[in-house]
Amino acid sequence: MGKYNAIDLFSGAGGLSYGFESAGFNILLGIDNDNKALLILIFRFSLQE
């Protein structure tokens, strides 16, 4: 069975994404309106801008 995918809405710095990733999910997208939080999220999870 393959991995499940997750999208993190209102992601902040990625705490929920970290939990999902630790549980084996693929993080496809993080959305937030705080640019500083998004920069941290991009750095932590190697996401594309």
Image (cartoon, rainbow, N blue to C red):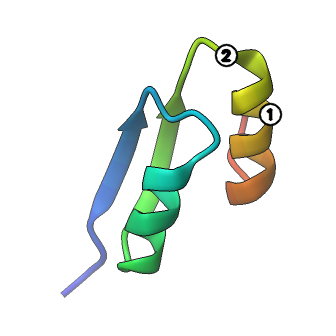
Residue 31 lies, with reference to residue 17, above or below; the image says: above
Q: What element carries label 2?
A: loop
Seen at 33% across and 52% down, the residue is 6
Seen at 38% across and 65% down, the residue is 20
Report the amino acid beneath label 1: Leu
Seen at 41% across and 40% down, the residue is 8
Q: Residue 39 carries which label?
A: 1
Q: Quadrant of residue 33?
A: top right
Q: In which quarter of the image is residue 46?
A: bottom right
Kindly report which numbered mark, 2 or 1, lies closer to the viewer in this rendering: 2
Say few, some or many: other residues with alpha carbon within 10 Å of mark 1 (under 14 / 14 to 19 / 20 or more).
some
Residue 18 lies, with reference to residue 34, above or below; the image says: below
* Residue position for label 2: 34
Report the amino acid beneath label 2: Asp
As measured in the structure, the alpha-carbon distance from the residue carrying label 2 to the one carrying label 1 is: 9 Å
Q: Position of residue 19 (x, y in %)?
A: 43, 66
Residue 41 lies, with reference to residue 16, above or below; the image says: above
Image quarter (top left, top right, bottom left or bottom right) of the C terminus: top right
Q: Is mark 1 on a helix, strand or loop?
A: helix
Which of 4 and 14 lies nearest the eye of the viewer? Answer: 14
Mark before the other along the chain sequence, 2 or 1 = 2
Furthest-bottom residue in view?
1
